[in-house]
Image: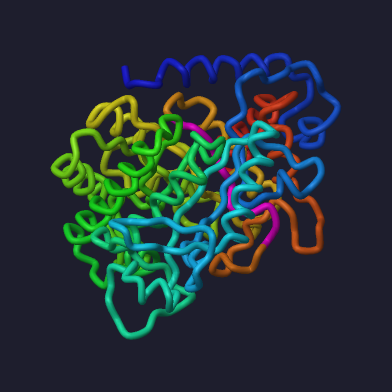
Amino acid sequence: MKKNAWMRTVAALLLATVLLFTTQPLTAQGAYLEGDDRFELTLDSKKGLQGDYMLTRDGVTGKHMLLNLYLDVIDSDYRTEVVQYVDDVPYYFDPVAVSAFSYRLKQAYEKDIDVTLVILLRGDEHCGKLGLMAVKQEAYDPDRLYAMDPNSQALTAFFRLIARRFGSDANGAKHFILGNEVNMPEAYNYTGTSDPYENADLYAQTFVKFEHELTNEGNYNSRAYISLDHTWTVDGEKDEGIGGKEFLDLFHERVHELSQDCRWNVAYHLYAPDLKKTSSIWKNPELLTQEIDTPYIGPGNLSVLTDYLAETYTPDCRVLLSEQGYDIGEGEEIQAAGIALCYYEALTNPMVEAAIFRSYVDEGTDGGLDLGLVAKNGKEREAFRVYQQMDGKRGLYIMAYYLARSKTTWK
């Protein structure tokens, strides 16, 4: 029997119990979203959002908050009072930006919200002069993300400052993700090469360096994560990436060579296999299989990833569903189903720390996708109502509705 299977069996029995005591027909959508308080979900919340909406918008619920930390934002090319020395060489940081992040972390801590910081490097001119980029060139694109140079002394200073000021030991972030979808080096974490070995080696060196600084500063309650997109054995839409499984295997091998003590975890993006068709989660089973060679990992087969991690590496490895959203193109019910199915996977898998959704509101920056729980005009979508309630009263009740619909009506 596969690991985690017993938990999924228990969850399925709970869902069956919910449906058994449901008097309304499954087609009566409204009855599933309001007016029923017979079932209260008591599992700990794993839901969250990218951005600080839980701090700035009244009534937005969640346990997890993800913020992007761009190195160029905290960098300063002027002498300031925020300085970090490495081998007697001073590196300076923007006191306003550092204070702003510290304040957000303090707010979250006071509200018992766990923060995830994603450490990213954009093509900033001064960061380039400091030697932070792995790719050395005359000029850098400010709208592009670059891989970091693990041999850079300046990078040590940045990592050390982040560990000291923003780590869990200072009531800061619980989770740190280094880079974004690093198995897609052309689109993100640009390295100048698509070679799997070179990319895994470069990222492993950088990861070991960051994890060392994080633990060296006493942040024993913080975790560091490798960031992967939703591909598993395929290499992206334009064949410019590296399958997640191949990258992970190469990364682990190189980390093990560099450090016996480095602890790594996986930040996965649990999108639908076809980004523009949320229904592909259940309508295209050949893309989300239960086999190890499945093309994609998504809602419906997350256990393939977690079983592989536990059986191949260690059951102590944690999975953070750090970015996923579902397009509105097929209608509100289908989008809401994506949210519900993803969260069901998170709740019933003990290796999963959280499910953090991409967009509270449509942002127009997601490659033509509208992933918001709320429309640009402020109208709350069905997905938002599901998000708000899915781990409170009637949580499993609501998810049972979408699970049943995806297996019957929407087939």
Is residue 175 depicted above or below 69 in this figure? Answer: above
Measuring from the top left, give residue 287's x and y in whole percent: 38, 48
Q: Nearer the viewer, residue 104 or 333?
A: 104
Q: Nearer the viewer, residue 120 or 195?
A: 120
In the image, residue 354 lies in the stretch drawn in magenta: yes
Q: Residue at x 51, y 46 (%)?
A: 165
Measuring from the top left, give residue 86's x and y in whole percent: 32, 56
- Write down the region rendered in magenta: 352-362
Q: Is residue 19 visible?
A: no
Is residue 238 depicted above or below 252 in this figure? Answer: below
Q: Is residue 392 left or right of residue 168?
A: right
Q: Residue at x 26, y 72 (%)?
A: 192
Q: Nearer the viewer, residue 251 or 285?
A: 251
Q: Residue at x 47, y 56 (%)?
A: 274
Quadrant position of residue 48:
top right
Q: Quadrant of the N terminus?
A: top left
